[in-house]
Image (cartoon, grey):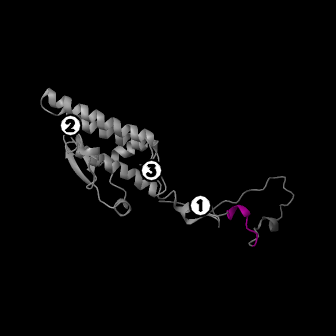
Amino acid sequence: MLVRNAPVSARRPANSPSESPAAEKPNAAAVPAAIHQKDSFSNTTTALQRTAKVGAAPAGDHGKLMMEYLTGARPPPADFEQVIGYKPYAIQTPHGQRMQDPLGYASVPLKIGPDKEFDPAAKTHDYGYDLLRYFEKKGTPLGPDARKAADALFRKDMFDYANDQKGALSRFKYRSWAQIYATAVELNSVRQGHGPP
């Protein structure tokens, strides 16, 4: 059973000059100023400013957040498809689930190297970069750790593919190309300040 007591009014100090019964009755017309606090949104606040925090990127470790998106531990933002133009899909790899950009591909100049073999890693990496673009378009860009995480997973996925190959020569070949591709991507990220591409 829940019992609520009536609110208790503040007591006057014992040495108060006015202790008459008339002085103890509150005046209905007098309302304390503290009750009417000013609204935090002033007339000059724009709608964008009022809604900025609502649509903001989640606070915290943006590198971890990116990994959750890329591995499917976190679903894409609700309006991702409307903003970016496609719906990511999941694939299962020998090294875990990855989310993919269906329109993505390994964009290698002159198609040198094993671009087809690294295509799954590239499609996940493309989705990561599209997440960076998405949050930038929403006005709340992710921090540099998000792009670093996308690049690190790209590197890992390519080396996982290389290390899964049978035969020392094949492993050496794919590891070499993985190093070239990953280094090129990472240098480009440094050039762009680890921000949205």
Question: Overall secondary structure of the magenta stretch?
Answer: loop
Q: Earlier in the sequence, mark 1 or mark 2?
A: 1
Report how far apart the C-alphas of labels 3 and 1 lie in the structure: 41 Å
Q: Which amino acid lies under the numbered mark 2 shown in the image of this protein?
A: Tyr
- Taking 42 as reference, is 146 left or right? left
Task: Identify residue for label 2.
Answer: 161
Indicate the secondary structure of the residue bearing disc 2. Answer: helix
- Mark 1 highlights which residue? 5
The kind of residue tagged 1 is: Asn
Q: Nearer the viewer, mark 3 or mark 1?
A: 3
Tell which of 81 and 51 is nearer to you.
Answer: 81
User: In the orientation shown, which residue stands out farthest toward the left?
Assistant: 166
Left of 161 or right of it: where is 134?
right
The answer to whether residue 35 is magenta is yes
Q: Is residue 110 one of those drawn in magenta?
A: no
Residue 54 point in image, percent of width and height:
49, 59
Residue 129 percent across, percent down from the top left: 37, 49
3 and 2 marks in contact (CB < 8 Å): no
The vertical placement of 65 against 35, above or below, is: above
Q: Position of residue 11 (x, y in %)?
A: 74, 56
Do the residues bearing badges 1 and 2 touch, measured as CB atoms within 8 Å?
no
* Residue 108 seen: no
* Residue reaching furthest to the bottom: 29
Residue furthest top as drawn: 168
Disc 3 versus disc 2: nearer the observer: 2
Q: Which residues are magenta?
A: 29-37
Which badge, 3 or 2, comes first in the chain's sequence? 3
Of the residues shown, which amino acid type is indicated by label 3?
Answer: Pro
- Residue 87 can be seen, yes or no: yes
Q: Residues within 10 Å of mark 3 (few under 14, many from 20)?
A: few
- Residue at point 15%, 28% (across, down): 169
Q: Which mark is residue 58?
A: 3
